[in-house]
Image (cartoon, rainbow, N blue to C red):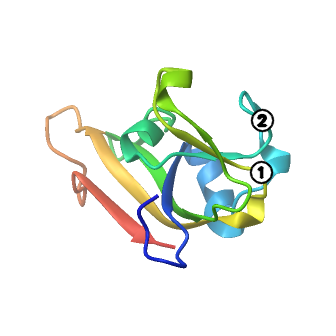
Protein backbone atom coordinates (compact mmCIF):
# COMPACT_ATOMS: atom_id res chain seq x y z
CA UNK A 1 0.00 0.00 0.00
CA UNK A 2 2.60 2.52 -1.16
CA UNK A 3 0.47 5.61 -1.83
CA UNK A 4 1.10 9.20 -0.87
CA UNK A 5 -0.12 10.18 2.59
CA UNK A 6 -3.89 10.69 2.58
CA UNK A 7 -4.41 8.94 -0.77
CA UNK A 8 -6.24 5.67 -1.08
CA UNK A 9 -3.98 2.94 -2.49
CA UNK A 10 -4.42 1.64 -6.04
CA UNK A 11 -5.96 -1.78 -6.57
CA UNK A 12 -7.17 -3.81 -9.56
CA UNK A 13 -10.31 -5.87 -10.18
CA UNK A 14 -10.57 -8.38 -13.03
CA UNK A 15 -14.03 -9.04 -14.44
CA UNK A 16 -15.94 -9.89 -17.58
CA UNK A 17 -17.13 -7.49 -20.22
CA UNK A 18 -20.75 -8.19 -19.20
CA UNK A 19 -20.20 -6.62 -15.76
CA UNK A 20 -17.93 -3.83 -16.97
CA UNK A 21 -20.67 -1.42 -18.06
CA UNK A 22 -22.39 -1.52 -14.70
CA UNK A 23 -19.11 -1.09 -12.80
CA UNK A 24 -18.01 1.81 -15.02
CA UNK A 25 -21.40 3.49 -14.72
CA UNK A 26 -22.32 2.87 -11.07
CA UNK A 27 -19.25 1.50 -9.28
CA UNK A 28 -19.22 -1.70 -7.28
CA UNK A 29 -22.32 -3.10 -5.58
CA UNK A 30 -22.06 -5.91 -3.04
CA UNK A 31 -25.58 -6.99 -3.93
CA UNK A 32 -24.22 -8.21 -7.28
CA UNK A 33 -21.48 -10.34 -5.68
CA UNK A 34 -21.65 -14.11 -6.00
CA UNK A 35 -18.73 -15.60 -4.10
CA UNK A 36 -17.29 -14.34 -0.85
CA UNK A 37 -14.64 -16.95 -0.02
CA UNK A 38 -12.75 -14.67 2.38
CA UNK A 39 -15.73 -12.67 3.63
CA UNK A 40 -18.32 -10.33 2.18
CA UNK A 41 -16.83 -7.43 0.25
CA UNK A 42 -15.48 -6.20 -3.06
CA UNK A 43 -12.36 -8.16 -3.97
CA UNK A 44 -9.37 -6.45 -5.53
CA UNK A 45 -5.61 -6.81 -5.50
CA UNK A 46 -2.56 -4.55 -5.63
CA UNK A 47 -1.30 -6.70 -8.56
CA UNK A 48 -2.63 -6.16 -12.07
CA UNK A 49 -1.30 -9.65 -12.94
CA UNK A 50 -3.39 -11.27 -10.20
CA UNK A 51 -6.46 -9.28 -11.30
CA UNK A 52 -5.94 -10.44 -14.89
CA UNK A 53 -6.39 -14.05 -13.77
CA UNK A 54 -10.02 -13.12 -12.97
CA UNK A 55 -10.62 -11.12 -16.16
CA UNK A 56 -12.74 -13.04 -18.66
CA UNK A 57 -11.54 -12.81 -22.26
CA UNK A 58 -13.79 -11.19 -24.86
CA UNK A 59 -13.57 -10.84 -28.64
CA UNK A 60 -13.79 -7.56 -30.56
CA UNK A 61 -13.13 -7.22 -34.30
CA UNK A 62 -11.62 -10.70 -34.37
CA UNK A 63 -9.07 -10.11 -31.61
CA UNK A 64 -9.24 -11.33 -28.01
CA UNK A 65 -8.92 -8.96 -25.03
CA UNK A 66 -9.13 -8.83 -21.24
CA UNK A 67 -10.18 -5.91 -19.07
CA UNK A 68 -9.25 -4.97 -15.54
CA UNK A 69 -10.52 -2.02 -13.52
CA UNK A 70 -8.04 0.20 -11.72
CA UNK A 71 -9.40 1.48 -8.40
CA UNK A 72 -8.65 3.57 -5.38
CA UNK A 73 -9.45 1.66 -2.20
CA UNK A 74 -9.83 2.99 1.31
CA UNK A 75 -7.87 1.14 3.96
CA UNK A 76 -10.79 1.61 6.37
CA UNK A 77 -12.05 -1.89 7.20
CA UNK A 78 -9.86 -3.41 4.47
CA UNK A 79 -9.04 -7.09 4.96
CA UNK A 80 -5.76 -8.27 3.40
CA UNK A 81 -5.51 -11.91 2.33
CA UNK A 82 -1.87 -12.89 1.84
CA UNK A 83 -0.69 -14.84 -1.19
CA UNK A 84 0.52 -17.63 1.12
CA UNK A 85 -3.07 -18.11 2.31
CA UNK A 86 -4.63 -18.50 -1.15
CA UNK A 87 -1.87 -19.62 -3.50
CA UNK A 88 -2.68 -16.95 -6.11
CA UNK A 89 -1.63 -13.53 -4.85
CA UNK A 90 -2.55 -10.87 -2.34
CA UNK A 91 -6.26 -10.03 -2.21
CA UNK A 92 -7.89 -7.01 -0.64
CA UNK A 93 -11.46 -7.40 0.60
CA UNK A 94 -13.25 -4.07 1.04
CA UNK A 95 -16.48 -4.69 2.99
CA UNK A 96 -17.98 -1.30 2.07
CA UNK A 97 -18.65 -0.99 -1.67
CA UNK A 98 -18.57 2.82 -1.42
CA UNK A 99 -14.97 2.68 -0.15
CA UNK A 100 -13.57 1.26 -3.41
CA UNK A 101 -13.84 3.44 -6.50
CA UNK A 102 -13.06 2.40 -10.06
CA UNK A 103 -11.41 5.21 -12.00
CA UNK A 104 -9.83 3.54 -15.01
CA UNK A 105 -10.37 0.49 -17.18
CA UNK A 106 -7.29 -1.26 -18.55
CA UNK A 107 -7.65 -3.34 -21.71
CA UNK A 108 -5.04 -5.85 -22.86
CA UNK A 109 -4.79 -7.57 -26.23
CA UNK A 110 -4.31 -11.29 -25.54
CA UNK A 111 -4.48 -12.71 -29.04
CA UNK A 112 -4.51 -10.98 -32.40
CA UNK A 113 -6.91 -11.65 -35.25
CA UNK A 114 -6.71 -14.92 -37.20
CA UNK A 115 -4.40 -13.35 -39.78
CA UNK A 116 -1.94 -12.43 -37.01
CA UNK A 117 -2.63 -8.70 -36.98
CA UNK A 118 -4.13 -6.81 -34.06
CA UNK A 119 -7.64 -5.46 -34.55
CA UNK A 120 -7.84 -2.19 -36.49
CA UNK A 121 -6.99 0.23 -33.68
CA UNK A 122 -5.66 -2.19 -31.05
CA UNK A 123 -2.71 -1.47 -28.80
CA UNK A 124 -1.03 -4.17 -26.73
CA UNK A 125 -2.58 -2.69 -23.60
CA UNK A 126 -3.95 0.65 -22.51
CA UNK A 127 -5.94 2.25 -19.72
CA UNK A 128 -8.71 4.79 -20.04
CA UNK A 129 -9.88 7.11 -17.28
CA UNK A 130 -13.60 6.69 -16.55
The front one of 64 and 26 is 26
Question: Residue 128's image quarter?
Answer: bottom left
Q: Where 39 sits versus 60, above or below? A: above
Q: Secondary structure at mark 2?
A: loop
Q: Residues within 10 Å of mark 1 (few under 14, many from 20)?
A: some
Q: Secondary structure at mark 1?
A: loop
Which residue bears the numbered disc 1?
Answer: 95
In the rendered structure, the answer to whether residue 126 lies left or right of residue 34 reads left
In the rendered structure, the answer to whether residue 28 lies left or right of residue 54 reads right
Q: How many marks?
A: 2
Q: Earlier in the sequence, mark 1 or mark 2?
A: 2
Most distant residue in the left direction: 116
The x and y percentages for residue 118 are 20, 47
Question: Residue at 80% across / 49% down in the picture?
Answer: 30
The x and y percentages for residue 23 are 65, 59
Most distant residue in the right direction: 31
Q: Residues within 10 Å of mark 2 (few under 14, many from 20)?
A: few
Question: Do the numbered discs 1 and 2 sit on residues whose CB atoms are within 8 Å?
Answer: yes
Q: Which mark is residue 53?
A: none
Q: Where 1 sits versus 8, above or below? A: above
Question: Residue at 69% across / 58% down in the picture?
Answer: 22
The front one of 129 and 121 is 129
Spatial CA distance of label 1 from label 2 is 8 Å
Most distant residue in the front direction: 5
The front one of 63 and 65 is 65
In the rendered structure, the answer to whether residue 100 lies left or right of residue 12 reads right
Question: Residue at 43% across / 75% down in the picture?
Answer: 4
Q: Where 68 sits versus 6, above or below? A: above
Which residue bears the numbered disc 2?
Answer: 39
Amino acid sequence: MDSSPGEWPVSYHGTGVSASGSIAQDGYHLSKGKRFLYGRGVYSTPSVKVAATYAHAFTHDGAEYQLVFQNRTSTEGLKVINAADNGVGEYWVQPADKLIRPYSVCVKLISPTEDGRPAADAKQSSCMIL
